[in-house]
Amino acid sequence: MHRRIHTLRLQAALLTAALLAAFTLAAAPAAPAASKAASAVAGDLCGGRCLDILPPGENGNATLADILANRVFGTRPGHTDDQLGPYANLAAAYPGLTDSTLHSFFNDASFGVPADQVASTASPRPDVTIVRDKATGVPHITGTTRYGTEFGAGYAAAQDRLWVMDLFRHVGRGQLSGFAGGAAANRQLEQSFWQAAPYTEQELQQQIDAVAAQGPRAQQALADARAYVDGINQYINESYQGRYFPGEYDLTGHVDAITNAGGIEPFQLTDLVALASVIGALFGSGGGGELASAQVKLAAEARYGKAAGDAVWSSLREADDPEAVKTLHDGQSFPYAQPPADPQGVAMPDPGSVVPERMIYDATGSANQSTTKAAGVLPGNLLTAKHGMSNALVVSGRYTDDGHPVAVFGPQTGYFAPQLLMLEELQGPGISARGAAFAGLSFYVELGRGQDYAWSATSAGQDITDTYAVPLCTTDGSPVTLASNSYLWHGQCLPFDRLAQHDAWNPTTADSTAAGSYTLVMYRSNYGLVTARGTVGGTPVAFTSLRSTYRHEVDSIIGFQMFNDPGAVHDPASFQQAAQQIGYTFNWFYADAQHTAYYNSGSNPVRAPGVDPGLPVTAQPAYEWAGFDPATNTARYTPPSEHPQSVDQDYYVSWNNKQADDYASAGFGDGSVHRANLLDARVKSLISSGDKVSRVTLTQAMESAALTDLRAEDVLPDLLRVIDSAPVTDPALADAVQKLANWRADGGQRKETSPGSHTYADADAVRTMDAWWPLLADGVFRPGLGDGLFTALTGALQINESPSGGQTGPTSGGVSANESIPHKGSSFQYGWWSYLDKDLRRVLGDQVAGPLAQPYCGGGDLTACRTVLLDTLGSALAQTPAQVYPGDANCSAGDQWCADTIIQRPLGGVTDDKIGWQNRPTYQQVVQFPGHR
C-alpha cells in the first residue's frame, strides 16, 4: 500500500528537502500476490494475431512522493512510460520488420492474461476481478454480473487516470482555472469549451433523462454508467483514506499534504456528460467555419468582382474536389452539404462589421493578465487549434497472405502524460472487448476488438454545424444596436438565454498565478450560441453556431455499448447498425476474419432547399433545418442509407480525408494533395504489386507514410519540374535544388541517419523545405490574391503544418493556431498543399481537374513562375538554422531533430522523455482474425 509522507511540506522554500525526504522515506506499495492461474477467456478468435500499443504507458497515477522523486531523480512509477520506447523504435526498425518482430513494437492484445504473466489481482467487489499483466499493467476486468463488470471498469479507470478524469470534468464545465489554477492556458482552454458546449447542471441532467427514455438498451447503458461511477468513487474513498491518491491533489491545494485535510469530490453521472462534451467537441464535430468562408468570399469579390470572385472563392473552398483522395474509391456517390447552384437565404456580413462575442466579464486580479509564468495543465488551444486525428489502413482478405483481412488503425489524439486514452479489457454479461477508451468514459471500450472483430475510427468532420445571422431587437422599443440582448424568433422578440460560469483561483504549489476571478458568459438563442455580432445589409445581427449534437452529448452511448456486445455485433451489417447510433462525426472501420466494412456516422441535419452550408444563413423559418425543434435541438437527419458506407471494398484508407464523391468537405483545403495520399499510394501499390498483404507489410506502409514529408512527396516534384525547365546557373541555388531532388529520390522522409543519431538524413534539404514553404505560399499567391484576400484565406486555411510547429508564414485568426503548436506529432493535415500543386501543374500545362479559377504563380507564365520559385528559394537559403528552428524550453535554437520531436504534454506531475517525430495514431491496433463465430 502506498504511504503518504507525513513530514512533507509544500512551501517552495522547503521543496528541496521535501524532494529528498520523499525519495528516501516513501514506502513502496506492496505488490499484491500474483494469482496462480488466470483463466483463459472463451471466445477469443484472434489466435494471438491482435496487437496494440498506447504510449507512454498505462499507469497515469503518481503519488506526491512519486512526483517529487521524478522531479529530482528522474524515476517514474512502474508502467508510466514503458510503451514509449517500443512506439518510438518502430521508426528506425520498420524497413526490416518481420512477423516475429512485430511484438517488439506492439503488445499482445489477446483476451485474458496467462497465469505466469499475472502481476496483480484485485477484487474491489466480490463480483469483479481486476487482473493486471506484467508486460504493460493493463487492467483485465472480469465480472460475474453486469454491475460488477462496470464497477470494476470505473475502479480501474480511477486507479490509472483519476487526475486526468478530474481535469476534464472541470474542463467540460468551464471550471478548469478554479480547479487547477489560473494560468493563462487554463483560462484559454476553459473559455473555448464554455463557448462550444455551455450547459447548466440541470441541462446536463436533462440529457441523461432524455437518453433514459430511449428504450431498454439506453436504460442498460445508464445503469452501466452508474455502476462505473460507483467504482470510481470507491477508489476515491479508498485512496484518500489510504493516502495514495494522485499527488496533483496535494500540489493544487485540494488536499493538505501533511494533515490530509480537504478531499476529492465524488463523481456523478453529469460529470460523464461534461466529459463526453469535451471529447465530442475535440474529435466528433464538423463545420462552423461559415464566417471565415464568408470573409474569403467578400475579399475575393472585392478583388475580382462578383462573378469572378465567387468563382475564385468556390475553387479555393474545394467543397467537392474531383482530385481529392477518397475513402470510398469505387465511384460511390453520397450527396450531402453540396454548395447549391442558386443559394438561398445567404446572410453575408457587411465588410468589417464582424466582432467576436465578448465572453469574459467582471475580471479581477490576474484574470486581466493575458500571459502567466505558469504553463497550465493543458494547451490553451487544445480545442480552437485544428486537429488532425486518426488514420486507418484496411485490406480485404482477397489480397492478404492468409485470406483474412488485415487492419492497421487507430486514433491520433495527441500525446500527453498520462494519455487521454487508457487501455482495458472488459469481460462480463453482454460485454466482451479489449482496447482503448477516453479516461472517465471507459465503461465501454471505444476503439478496439471484440471476440472475432476489431473496429476503429477517424474523425470525419462533415458539416453538422451551421452559422445563422439572427436579427437583434429590443423589447422596450429602444434603438437596436449590436449590444442588444434580444433577438427575433418567428416574429417575436425574445431575450437570449444567459449561461454564466464564475471561476476564481488562488496561487498553489503547482500554479503560482496570483489570485483572480471572472465570469464566463455565453448567450444562447433558438438558433444556437452567439459567437459574434455584426451587420447584414446594415441590420444588427448576432451570428450563432448551431450544432446538431449540442444537448445530445450522451446519445452516442448506445452505439458504443453495441460495439462491446458480442450479441449485437457479429458481421458488417450489425457493425454498421451500431455505428448508426453515434451522432458524432466519425469514420468507422471494421474487420473480421471474412469481411471489412466502413460507415460514416453523424447527426447530419436535413437543410432547407437552396441553403449553402458553407456560408452564414438568414435566421428565418424558410431556412431552418427540416423539422427543427429548438426546445430539444432536434431536427430531421439524413437517413443511414445516405451516409457513406461500404462492405468489402478492396482496401480502405482514411486520414481525415474526403469520404466519397459528392459528400462535401466542411472546410477549405481538401483537394488534390492531402496527407491521406501518403496512405493511399502505399496501400494501392501493395494491392497492385501482386504480392500478398500481411500485417507486416501494412504496418510498413503506415510507418513509411508516418515519416514522410507530404510536401516532399506530392508538391516538390511540381516545384522541381518548374525549376528544371531551364538550367540553374547560380551555384548555391543549384546545390540546393540538387539536395532537394536527392531527398525526394530518397523518399522524402524526415528520419535519422541511424537510430539515436538525432540528425536527419538529407538534413539540409529538410531545412530548406521548412524555410521555403511559407515563402513559396506568399511569393506565389499574394501578388494575385492581393493582401486582403491573402489574409482572409489564411483565416480559413493555414499555410503550413510542419512537424516543428514553426515556419508558419502569415497568419490570420484562430484557425492558424494549429500551425504553431510544437512537438505534437500530427502534421501536414492542414495547409496550402493543394493550392500549390494545382497552380504549378496548370503553369506546366498539365490537365488539372477542379483547377483554381485564376492562375497565380508568375501570373500563369512558366518563366515568371520559375523566377518566383528561385527567388523564394534563395530567401529560404539565407535563413540560418536558428531562424528556421528558433528553439524553445525543450530544444536549443537550430536543433532540427529536437524541434520535430514529440513530447508527451504533462497533464500531471510526472514527465516523460521526448521521442523522434512520427505522424501516426497515438493508440494503434494491428489485427488479422483467423477465426469467426
Image (cartoon, rainbow, N blue to C red):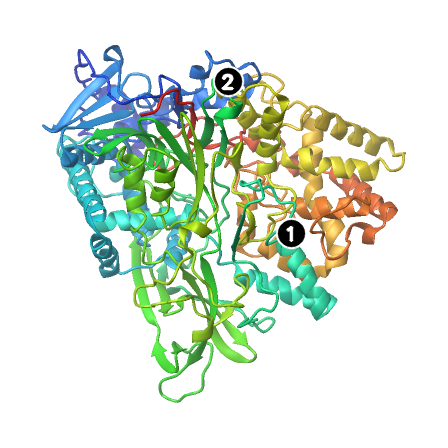
In this orientation, does residue 513 appear?
A: no
Describe residue 221's horizontal placement relative to residue 833 as left or right. Answer: left
Q: Quadrant of residue 465?
A: bottom left
Name the mark on residue 400: none
Mark 2: secondary structure: loop
Q: Quadrant of the N terminus?
A: top left
Q: Residue shown at 51%/23% (left/top)?
A: 699
Label count reads 2
The earlier-in-sequence mark between 2 and 1 is 2
Q: Residue 351's x, y, as percent? A: 61, 71
- Within-10-Å neighbours for mark 1: few <14, some 14–19, many 20+: some
- Quick check: 672 above or below 214? above
Label 2 to label 1, Cα distance in Å? 49 Å
Residue placed most toward the observer, 660 or 262:
660
Residue placed most toward the observer, 674 or 652:
652
Q: Residue shown at 28%/37% (left/top)?
A: 568
- Quick check: 350 above or below 252? below
Q: Residue 503's x, y, as percent? A: 30, 57
Q: Which residue is mark 1?
A: 810
Describe residue 486's horizontal placement relative to residue 64 as left or right. Answer: right
Q: Quadrant of residue 700?
A: top right
In this orientation, does residue 426 appear?
A: yes
Describe residue 576's horizontal placement relative to residue 565 as left or right. Answer: right
Q: Which residue is mark 2?
A: 401
Q: Residue 637's x, y, as percent? A: 40, 58
